[in-house]
Amino acid sequence: MKVGILGSGETGLTLGRGLVRAGYNVMIGTRNRYKEKLQQWIHENPHTAQLGTFAEAAAFGALLFLCTRWTGTQAAIETAGVWNFRKKVVVDVTNPLDGKGPDNMGRLHFSPGNAGSGGERVQAWLQDAHVVKALNCTGQQLITDPHLEEGLPTMFIAGNDDLAKKAVTDLLHHLGWRDVEDTGGIDMSRHLESLFMIWWAVGFRTGKWHHAFRLLRH
Ligand SMILES: NC(=O)c1ccc[n+]([C@@H]2O[C@H](COP(=O)([O-])OP(=O)(O)OC[C@H]3O[C@@H](n4cnc5c(N)ncnc54)[C@H](OP(=O)(O)O)[C@@H]3O)[C@@H](O)[C@H]2O)c1
């Protein structure tokens, strides 16, 4: 399957590496394809990895990942062209942070004016696409290799379309996320985005970043 990733930060590139390893054909969309790490990724995977603009990656993928910094997300979507997302499944990995980094207590803050959630905003920008919030509530260190000493964590997802959530669940299984929990519609994104704040706070307080959430059931 062809997958497009918008954004080539640590999250986009980690996802690119993991998806290629899992057998997908991947194009990362970026404003700067000459970054050393991207060129190395292409060099190591000449047949399955490609680089393009945001528009080229969005047109390439049958399934798309949004891995942009929140403050640049709307611009990235506009540059990519909303028509390139039409009827596609779009995995929203973003967290709607204000982009200022941690305050003096180590806390991150949501973008002001974001009364709902990032996931809902993305769905509103991409009304003809099926947006699924996923992979946002743990660090990029684990998103394509979620194996921890204490076991496999749970990935929580949210979205309005059941078939889209099924497609994302299958893909997550290929990345090693065996336990995927559907939390409901895209409006549940606000709670998944808050989970990221907890994930971050634990990392900041302990100085360790290899942790993730797990749902225990009877
Ligand atoms: N880092 C994590 O552990 C983690 C975990 C879960 C979720 N997330 C979320 O995943 C997203 C990506 O995280 P990251 O750490 O990889 O972020 P990042 O390095 O800060 O940014 C990712 C990419 O966003 C694009 N971007 C930034 N400003 C832009 C603008 N003004 N216009 C268009 N594009 C712009 C850039 O793409 P190009 O440079 O390719 O042009 C950049 O490489 C964020 O929303 C983050 O909250 C991150």
Image: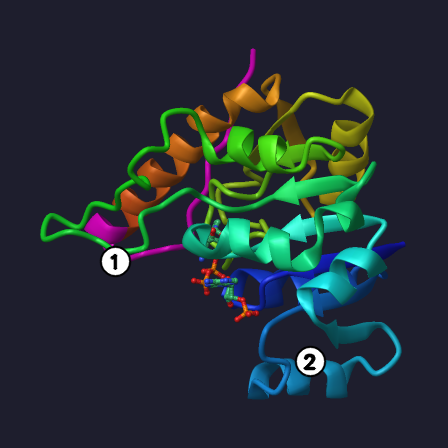
The reply to whether residue 86 is visible in this rendering is yes
Indicate if the residue with disc 2 has its beta carbon within 8 Å of ligand 1: no
Q: Is residue 160 above or below residue 91?
A: above
Q: Nearer the viewer, residue 217 or 85?
A: 85
Q: Residue at x 64, y 81 (%)?
A: 33
Describe the element under mark 2 as helix, strand or loop.
helix
Which stretch did the figure color magenta? 204-218
Q: Is residue 17 left or right of residue 74?
A: right
- Is there a contact, CB below 8 Å, between mark 2 and mark 1? no
Q: Is residue 87 left or right of residue 66?
A: right
The label nearer to you, 2 versus 1, is 2
The reply to whether residue 175 is visible in this rendering is no
97 in magenta: no
The residue type indicated by label 2 comes to: Trp
Q: Nearer the viewer, residue 114 or 148?
A: 114
Residue 56 appears at what percent x and percent y? 77, 66
Residue 143 appears at what percent x and percent y? 58, 52
Q: Nearer the viewer, residue 154 or 71?
A: 71
Q: Main secondary structure of the magenta part?
A: loop
Q: Residue at x 58, y 19 (%)?
A: 183
Task: Assign the N terminus to one quadrant of the image.
Answer: bottom right
Q: Residue at x 51, y 46 (%)?
A: 94
Describe the element under mark 1 as helix, strand or loop.
loop
Q: Earlier in the sequence, mark 2 or mark 1?
A: 2
Q: Is residue 70 above or below residue 191?
A: below
Q: Is residue 42 left or right of residue 136?
A: right
For residue 41, which numbered disc appears in the image?
A: 2
Residue 139 appears at what percent x and percent y? 46, 52
Give the residue pinned by disc 1.
207
The residue type indicated by label 1 comes to: Gly
* Number of other residues with Cα within 10 Å of mark 2, as a class: few under 14, some 14 to 19, many 20 or more: some
